[in-house]
Image (cartoon, rainbow, N blue to C red):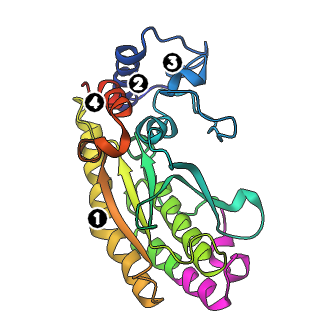
Amino acid sequence: MKETSIQKAIRDFAKKGFERSEGTFQGDGIHRHVLKNKYDNFIKMPPSNFKFHRWAGSLTSSQAFAYNIFSGVGNAEFEYNMWALDYNPLHKACVDVAIEDEKGDIDMYEVKMFEFATSVGKNQIFHKEGRKYFNPKNYNCSTQEIAESFTYFIESVVNHFKNRSMYGEGIKQLCCHLLGIINEKTKYDKLCDKKVRLHSLCFDHNFGSHDFTQSLESYRKILKEDFFPIVNNYLEKINMHDQIEYCGYLGASDYIENNIELLGIANYDYVKKRYFNG
């Protein structure tokens, strides 16, 4: 498949950033943006139980980006999983990072790097799963009432974005994370007494690509102006707005500048140099 102009711009930027921080790029011999050794994509060796994504060695990997930002936080939990649909492990909702603060509240971060600029299409929300998300019997919820209310929520999201060109996979993932959080709070003990804040942390550096900048702004507006009110209205309807909060879009550049102490200077310096021309 021929590489598009935005894909080339992203690949070139990501490669320059890697070489600026790590040195010579050694590819896998197949893909122009995938490292021969995936571990080189991470600021330090992840723990032995770390669940690598399929493309963890890609220079555009959001998983590597998330790890390189948050691995200096002592209590950061990566690939935090929660039950979404039934008891099939493939149906778990897996958020990139979860961090408990000093009050015991949980901040969860769904991290995106370039997906919203390269995976845009129409009607992409829940398109591969058929009707299973619309059948309350498939939900791993504590009550049928919660399952049914969530199917109505899913339908409202799908109808709201119908026929719009957008990064639908990102919206789908956020819906699944929300379902996982609701299940963990109502059915299991892990989050029952904690407030959970869910953030959409997005790479937002303007590296000279007009197409990327437009895609970022489109996704930011969709999260802020469309998805944010839908989610929080739903949480109010099920009386969980004081326990769960969707915080919407969060730009990575401002986030790292405002949280140097939390992230640690080593991670801050690495991320700044590699991803933000710092």
Query: N-terminal of the two: label 2 or label 1?
Result: 2
Per the model, the C-alpha gap separating discs 3 and 4 is: 21 Å
Could you tell me the amino acid type at mark 4?
Phe
Residue 32: mark in rendering = 3
Q: CA distance from mark 2 to mark 4?
A: 15 Å
Q: Nearer the viewer, residue 143 or 217?
A: 143
The quarter of the picture where residue 6 lies is top left
Is residue 140 covered in magenta?
Answer: yes
Gap between marks 1 and 4 measured at Cα:
24 Å
Q: Nearer the viewer, mark 2 or mark 4?
A: 4
Residue at the image position 42 percent from the left and 10 percent from the top = 23
| Residue nearest the viewer, comparing 187 with 235 | 187
Q: Which mark is residue 224?
A: 1
Dot 2 and dot 4 residues touching (CB under 8 Å) = no
Point out the residue furthest to the top here.
Answer: 24
Marks 3 & 2, CB-CB < 8 Å contact: yes
Q: Nearer the viewer, mark 3 or mark 1?
A: 1
Quarter that holds the C terminus = top left
Local crowd at mark 1 within 10 Å, few (<14), some, or many (≥20)?
Answer: some
Left or right side of 169 for 218 = left
Q: Which residues are magenta?
A: 129-152
Asked if marks 2 and 1 touch (Cβ < 8 Å), the reply is no
List the residue tagged with mark 4: 276
